[in-house]
Amino acid sequence: DHLPSSHGWYSGQIVTTVPAAGKFHIVVVRNHGSNPLPFVLQVTLPESIETMELKKPIFGAVATGQMAFYRFKVDNPNTDIEIYLTKLDGDPNLAVSHEEVSKRPTPLSAQWTVNGEGDDELVIVPSDRKRLSHPTGWFHIGVHGKGNTAFS
């Protein structure tokens, strides 16, 4: 028996199954003549929330209609919050909320959303009406995939 698979980037193959607690053994095999190709493998379980480092880009992917979640902390109430979502493939959409509003913001539940085609940009200034009641603390990002989507 084989797990269902689909073609991934660079002619690789992606295999998924239902996530479960336990050990996972992941093998990446890629033939490229006699020279091995380097791979970086990142596994994130669905519904997990990844903590971001400020000014350090992340890379992610979501399937059609799925979400990836991230969070970052704002300590200074007078700081502009600038979020840039760069499309690598597909069409990612951005949803942002303070954690007291939603730890898993979606396009329908978020305080701020950007649903444009391609790259998305959001700037939340300190005087923003929705931010006034939550000027600092943890802010959460949801990235929604309108189709299979890769982003940074």
Image: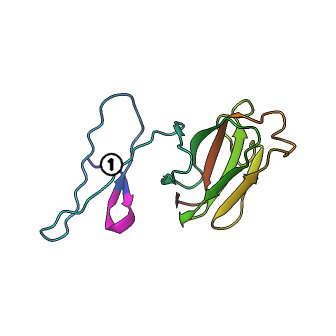
Residue 6 is at least partly visible in this image? yes
Q: Residue at x 78, y 43 (%)?
A: 111
Q: Is residue 80 above or below residue 75?
A: below
Q: Is residue 92 magenta?
A: no
The quadrant where residue 18 appears: top left
Q: Is residue 10 magenta?
A: yes
Kindly give the residue lying farthest to the bottom in the view shown. Answer: 33
Kindly give the residue lying farthest to the left in the view shown. Answer: 34
The quadrant where residue 76 appears: top right
Left/right of residue 119 with respect to residue 122 in the rendered view: left
Magenta range: 6-13
Q: Residue at x 38, y 62 (%)?
A: 8
Q: Is residue 97 above or below residue 151?
A: above
Kindly give the residue lying farthest to the right in the view shown. Answer: 129
Colour convention of the picture = rainbow
Q: Which of 84/49 is in front?
A: 84
Residue corresponding to mark 1: 3
Q: How far from the left and from the top, in percent, is residue 100?
A: 73, 29
Q: How far from the left and from the top, in percent, is residue 74?
A: 66, 38
Graded by Cα atoms within 10 Å as few (under 14), some (14 to 19) or many (20 or more), the crowding at tag 1 reads few
Q: How far from the left and from the top, in percent, is residue 103?
A: 65, 34
Q: Which of 4/20 is in front?
A: 20
Q: Is residue 59 above or below residue 99?
A: below
Q: How far from the left and from the top, in percent, is residue 132?
A: 84, 37
> Three-letter amino acid code at disc 1?
Leu
For the image, the number of numbered tags is: 1
Q: Which of 134/9 is in front?
A: 134
Q: Residue at x 49, y 54 (%)?
A: 61
Element class at badge 1: loop
